[in-house]
Image: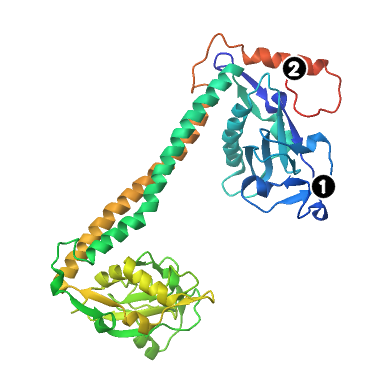
Amino acid sequence: MSGLPRGWVEASLGEICHLQNGRAYKQEELLSSGKYPVLRVGNFFTSQKWYYSDLELEPTKYCDDGDLLYAWSASFGPRIWSGGKVIFHYHIWRVDLKRSVSDRDFVFHWFNWDKENIKAAHGTGSTMIHVTKGDMEQRRILLPPLAEQKRIVAKLETLNAKAARARTELARIEALVSRYKQAVLSKAFSGELTSAEVSNWALCTLGDLALDVRYGTAEKCTYAPDLTPVLRIPNVANGRIDLSDLKHASFNEKELRKLELLEGDLLIIRSNGSLDLVGRSAVVDAAAAGMLFAGYLIRVRLALSKAMPSFIQYWMQSFAVRRTIEDAAKSTSGVNNVNSQQLQALQLKLPPLEEQHEIVRCIESAFAKIDRLAKEAKRALELVGRLDEAILAKAFRGELVSQDENDEPAEHLLARIRAEREAAPKGKRGRGATI
């Protein structure tokens, strides 16, 4: 291949390593305890459920700390093993390298980069990718001199450490968003956010502000756009009505009049397996007006001359109210419930209507700034991921570190490997040669 960096050579993966398969097991051979853990693909990535074996096998079926491994079926990719001596499964290769021509960590990083190329070749819709041993051994690798491989690894590890720190800091921002919003709500309902005089705030209950409190329909719903749309728990999302997944049902005129939603109604989740969702609410907007609502929701129709729906919605998100609702709703049965009486008994200090509008304006302004920060952090996190990919691409094009004319060219190293392979007696290859 022309145009390679100084001292680089193109080779097949099979020329610089031997891919050693593990052992295939029958289910009855996998024990709940035993002398050797059996490393399967699940353990390779996430699963903590281990099987064991008492079998004494040939050395090629074991791996140990420092071995480079590659899972090639379903979930696939490389790993430098650090879990002690184990038997590895047939769906994993131990990569036995020719150490005189290839650095373990360089090949590990190359595997990670090449894994994305394999995914791209299989297409975005592929979920069960596997690579055959023959195909993998034929994959082409651009190989730098051994000394340059080590310089590339050192540079990659420095850059990876910086990227990891950046990811940690950016992830902290996302985790802090909820805390920042709760701090805003705490100040809002104590009067600090608008420097309000709280002495003129009236102590009341949610029930005092409600014209009507009603449970939704138990009618079975389906996807039938020609019928009446019914809002369900998934439609009450993040304080807003989400119309992306609507179901429908048929109702008579009496039911329509009784359960029809008006703009400004407050919809509250009353029952759910997740305690965090119970008591979550959203204000009905113009797009949802005229729809009905399901039985796991409660509609609170407020007296608009007394209470602004958005003010009550934000108040219900505050820490103090959430704690009261969750304490009341907790259940050991797996389904948590809050009823209309408990909701109506919730106490609050209510500012004059004009002041409610100002508080809501301040909350929404502060939330918008927090959401922008969270969005920027998420975008930056995505950019870090793309930067990782770009760095790997530069590394394997010879653009990450400079070439050194004193390095022995990889072609010379590879030529010796080829010559020694040709001269060696034909036979079964064992554990990694370190020529």
> Residue 54 got which mark?
1
Q: Decide: few, some or many residues near mark 2? Use Cα within 10 Å; few <14, some 14-19, many ≥20.
A: some
- Residue lying furthest bottom in this view? 254
According to the image, what is the colour scheme of the structure?
Answer: rainbow
- Residue lying furthest top in this view? 406
Disc 2 or 1, which lies upstream in sequence? 1
The amino acid on which the numbered mark 1 sits, given as a three-letter code, is: Asp
Q: Which residue is mark 2?
A: 418
The amino acid on which the numbered mark 2 sits, given as a three-letter code, is: Arg
Disc number lying in front (2 or 1): 1
Instruction: Report x, y in % for residue 45.
Output: 62, 46
Q: Decide: few, some or many residues near mark 1? Use Cα within 10 Å; few <14, some 14-19, many ≥20.
A: some
Q: Nearer the viewer, residue 23 or 204?
A: 204
Residue at (28, 78) in percent of width and height: 347
Figure check: 165 above or below 245: above
- Image quadrant in which the N terminus is located: top right
Residue at (85, 28) in percent of width and height: 428
Residue at (81, 34) in percent of width and height: 59
